[in-house]
Each structure stands twice: as structure tokens, then as C-alpha cells.
């Protein structure tokens, strides 16, 4: 097996188990395209500043591009002897271009190199996750447009509260995703700063041009302090936090779908394309997709916690602990993308709202009681007094096995002379929803406006 890059300083070689323990190539190979891109920028900068000759810079970039091709075609598969992706690339480069390959690492450390790589990686991934968010928002918005007039019970404490337009319920998630999108765009600003040129920790003795490499790599700026540049992982924590919030949103929606698909609620029917069966109970149809999303939320939130704990005791600057940031980030990215995609498919084609059952549900409860109190309050009765009166009617109606709509006009008028025939219209589910016409409310007119606003929100990118 090949010697370690740093073996000259050592008397003997690494214990084989420790070599494996130390190596990150098994996972950081995922960074190779960004490592190559970062190295090409560094090589060009070395050439431009005269630290190496322009011809040497050319040779290095050509060799690095060749490695890209070799990797993409499956010919370059470095093993544990390479330790990590950075050594693997440098080593292969030297095989391809000869001794000039050994000049690539002039004025650079793996510390600023790896920091550059993960930022380039996260930058690309954030864009992709934003696209996935947009796709799911599109699906929710379309479904909302089709369901402005569909009513669904609204809950607080998981107790029937007031009926809603189904569109209003779906748009609540649209808005959560909108903030998730904004949050990622905001994290992006702090991801997109170049640590390259920080060196190992203190900068470098060579006349490098950090602004040039930053420009080549399309960073928005450079780290002001080299120590901070190589040891900061705030951006990774922020990303994991934004990702965790996305997952928490998806998990809440998942929980609702799981409830809704139960016999007890029966608000949605799962379609075969997005449900699974049981190995023993022939009748079962299980909501595995939302359950998995709910479950994976724990993983992503765990990664956030892991990254915070990774950083809390680290003295400046680089410490090998930082190698542990990668698997957390890779898994976070992979999980969030997969969950957004699965949820979009689920809502696009995997479930059907049972509208007849929903209409029955909102007609058969006391979720119009607030409207009776509002009816009186609008006619001059102090709200608390009206509320107390209605509380009593609910109690007696429940005891009599009646709903509010079953009360006779005499009964209403005995309760309070302000009641007239129009009370029946006022407590009909459709009217109960329509009447909540305050800005941001579930009234149909508001929901139409909210849909128009959502449309324009989708246009930003
Ligand atoms: N594989 C290392 C990591 O992921 C690269 C940086 C190594 N730097 C060092 N000084 N050992 O963090």
C-alpha cells in the first residue's frame, strides 16, 4: 500500500485500523467535484500572481479536469490509503501531470480547502432544496385552488373548534414553506463567503489573491479573519437548523395526513401509489410516506444537535473533530430533499380528500357556537354575556342530543329576544366560514386573496 502524504516525518506507518478510523474518503468523496473546482481556482490564482508559472497553472488545471472526467466515468475510485478526498486528488494529479502536481498545494492547507469545499457543496444543495420547496408549494397551491369551497373541521387542542376552508388549511403549510425558502436564501448569504487563502490558520507567506479565487468561485466575499475562516461552521449549523425547521413543518403535515387517513377521521383516502399493505392483516392500507417523513424528522433534528455539540468545546482553529461535520450535512441534505419530493408526490397524486365525509363532519358539531355568540355581540349584547348564554345552550343541547341548528325559533328567542330567523343562515357551516372575512382569515374572499398572494410569492427566486 502507498505511504501517507506526511510519512516522511514519521518513524513507522499507521496502524491499519487507525488508518480506517482516521480516513474520511469513504464519505468526503461526495465533495470531489467541489474540491476539483476549488483547486482549479487556486491553481489559476497561483499562475496569475506569479507564484507558479502560467504554464504550470495550465498543467494543473488540465490535470484536475482530467480527474473530473476519470471520476465521472467511474475510473477514479480512491481507497482508504488516500485518507481523504483532498489527498486523493493531489496524489492522482501528480500521477497525471508529474512533479508539477506537487506545486498545487502551495499557499494552501486542507483546512481552508475543506472549508471551501463544503461551502461550494452547500451552496449547490441549498439551491436544489429551494427548488424542491417550490415544487411542493406549487402542488399545495394547486390543491388549495381546487378546494376553496371544501370545508374541513378546524381544531385547537385536537378538539373541534371552527370550520375552515380546506384551501386555508393547505395555505398555512404553503406559508411555512415560504419562510423555509426565505430562511435558506438567508443562510445562503453566510454560506457563500470564501475561506480559501486562510491557509492552515494564519494566512500564508505567498502573495496570494484571495479576492481573485473568491471571484472565480462566485463567492460573494472573503472571510475577514483567517482563524475564523478555517474554523467557522456557523453556516453549517444554520443550514441544519433551517433544514430541521423544514422537517418539523413536513412532520406536522404528515401527522395530520396520518390522522386524516384513519377510520376515525376518514378525511382522506390514500391512493395505492402512495400506501403500503400489511404482511398479516389483509385489510390494511398504511400511510408509510407521512410516517417516514415524521420519523426522518428526528434524524435531521439530531444532526443539528450533533453539529452544535461538535462545535461547543473546540478551541481555535482547525481540529480534526470538524471532519465529523460532513456526514451530518450529507445526510441532512439527502433526507430533506427526499422528504420534500415524497410529500409533493403524496399531495399531487397520493391522496384524495373525502369531500362528502368532510361536509358531514362540519355540519354535525358545535363548531358554529362562536358564531351564535358573535351574532348576539353584533346586535349589542356584550360578548362575554353572549358567550355565557351560548355556553348554556350548548350544555342543554348536548343533554338533549340536539345540535344548534335543531333549536326552534321560539327556543332561540326565549334565550334572547335579539335572535331572528336569520340565525339559521348565520350558523350554517358555509356561512360560518364565509363570515370570517378578516384579513388572513378563512373567509372565501380572503382565501381567494391569499391564493393570489401565494401565486406572486412563488415568482421570487
Ligand atoms: N478530512 C479532513 C476534514 O474533513 C480535511 C482537513 C484535514 N485537515 C487537517 N489539518 N488534518 O476535516
Image: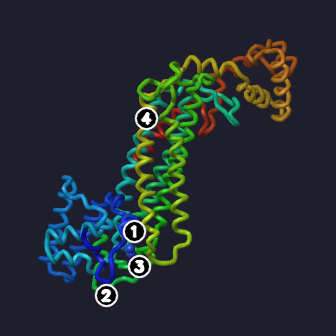
Q: Find out whether the residues at labels 4 and 1 contact each other: C-beta distance under 8 Å.
A: no
Q: Is 10 rendered above or below residue 238? A: below
Judging by the rendered image, the residue that carries numbered circle 3 is: 226
Q: Nearer the viewer, residue 227 or 26?
A: 26
Residue at 48% x, 25% y is 277
| Element type where label 2 sits in the image | loop
The mark nearer the N terminus, 1 or 2, is 1
Mark 1 vs 3: CB contact within 8 A: no
Return the residue at label 1. Answer: 18
Callout 1: SS: helix
Asked which quadrant contains residue 376, the reply is top right
Question: x, y (%) of residue 334?
Answer: 40, 49
Residue of label 4: 139
In front: mark 4 or mark 3?
3
Mark 4 in CB contact with mark 2 (< 8 angstroms): no
Q: Residues within 10 Å of mark 2 (few under 14, many from 20)?
A: few
Instruction: Classify mark 3: helix, strand or loop.
Output: helix
Front residue of this view, candidates 197 and 81: 81
CB of mark 1 near ligand 1 (< 8 Å): no
**Percent position of residue 282, x then y:** 50, 19
The image position of residue 388, as x and y in percent, is 85, 30
Residue at x-position 44% and y-position 79%: 227
The structure's colour scheme is rainbow
Q: Residue at x 52, y 36 (%)?
A: 291
Residue 458 against residue 159 in the figure, above or below: below
| Count of numbered badges drawn on the protein | 4
Residue that badge 2 annotates = 205
Q: Quadrant of the N terminus?
A: bottom left
> What kind of element bears circle 4?
helix
Amino acid at each position: 500500500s502507498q505511504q501517507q502524504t506526511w510519512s516522511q516525518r514519521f518513524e513507522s506507518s499507521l496502524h491499519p485500523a487507525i488508518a480506517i478510523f482516521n480516513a474520511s474518503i469513504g464519505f468526503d468523496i461526495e465533495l470531489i467535484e467541489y474540491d476539483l473546482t476549488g483547486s482549479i481556482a487556486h491553481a489559476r490564482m497561483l499562475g496569475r500572481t506569479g507564484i507558479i508559472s502560467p504554464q504550470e497553472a495550465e498543467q494543473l488545471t488540465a490535470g484536475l479536469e482530467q480527474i473530473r472526467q476519470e471520476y465521472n466515468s467511474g475510473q477514479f475510485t480512491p481507497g482508504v490509503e488516500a485518507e481523504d478526498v483532498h489527498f486523493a486528488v493531489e496524489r492522482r494529479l501528480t500521477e497525471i501531470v508529474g512533479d508539477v502536481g506537487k506545486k498545487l498545494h502551495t499557499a494552501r492547507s486542507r483546512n481552508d480547502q475543506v472549508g471551501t469545499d463544503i461551502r461550494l457543496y452547500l451552496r449547490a444543495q441549498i439551491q436544489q432544496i429551494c427548488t424542491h420547496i417550490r415544487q411542493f408549494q406549487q402542488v399545495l397551491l394547486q390543491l388549495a385552488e381546487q378546494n376553496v369551497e371544501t370545508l374541513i373541521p378546524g381544531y385547537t387542542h385536537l378538539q373541534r373548534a371552527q370550520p375552515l376552508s380546506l384551501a386555508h388549511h393547505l395555505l398555512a403549510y404553503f406559508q411555512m414553506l415560504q419562510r423555509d425558502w426565505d430562511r435558506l436564501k438567508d443562510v445562503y448569504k453566510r454560506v457563500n463567503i470564501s475561506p480559501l487563502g486562510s491557509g492552515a490558520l494564519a494566512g500564508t507567506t505567498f502573495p496570494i489573491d484571495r479576492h481573485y479565487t473568491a471571484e472565480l468561485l462566485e463567492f460573494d466575499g472573503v472571510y475577514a479573519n483567517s482563524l475564523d475562516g478555517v474554523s467557522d461552521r456557523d453556516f453549517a449549523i444554520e443550514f441544519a437548523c433551517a433544514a430541521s425547521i423544514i422537517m418539523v413543518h413536513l412532520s406536522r403535515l404528515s401527522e395530520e395526513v396520518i390522522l386524516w387517513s384513519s377510520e376515525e377521521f376518514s378525511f382522506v383516502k390514500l391512493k395505492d401509489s402512495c400506501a403500503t399493505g400489511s404482511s398479516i392483516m389483509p385489510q390494511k392500507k398504511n400511510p408509510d410516506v407521512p410516517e417516514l417523513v415524521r420519523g426522518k424528522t428526528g434524524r435531521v433534528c439530531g444532526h443539528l444537535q450533533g453539529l452544535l455539540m461538535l462545535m461547543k468545546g473546540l478551541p481555535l482553529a482547525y481540529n480534526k473533530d470538524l471532519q465529523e461535520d460532513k456526514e451530518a450535512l450529507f445526510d441532512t441534505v439527502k433526507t430533506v430533499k427526499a422528504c420534500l419530493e415524497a410529500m409533493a408526490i403524496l399531495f399531487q397524486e397520493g391522496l384524495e380528500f373525502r369531500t362528502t365525509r368532510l361536509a358531514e363532519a362540519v355540519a354535525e358539531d358545535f363548531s358554529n357556537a362562536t358564531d351564535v355568540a358573535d351574532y348576539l355581540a353584533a346586535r349589542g349584547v356584550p360578548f362575554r354575556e353572549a358567550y355565557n348564554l351560548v355556553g348554556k345552550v350548548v350544555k342543554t343541547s348536548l343533554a338533549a342530543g340536539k345540535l344548534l341548528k335543531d333549536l326552534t325559533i321560539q327556543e332561540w328567542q326565549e334565550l334572547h329576544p335579539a335572535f331572528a330567523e336569520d340565525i339559521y343562515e348565520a350558523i350554517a357551516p358555509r356561512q360560518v366560514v364565509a363570515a370570517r372575512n378578516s384579513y388572513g382569515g378563512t373567509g372565501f374572499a380572503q382565501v381567494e386573496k391569499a391564493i393570489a398572494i401565494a401565486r406572486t410569492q412563488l415568482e421570487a427566486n
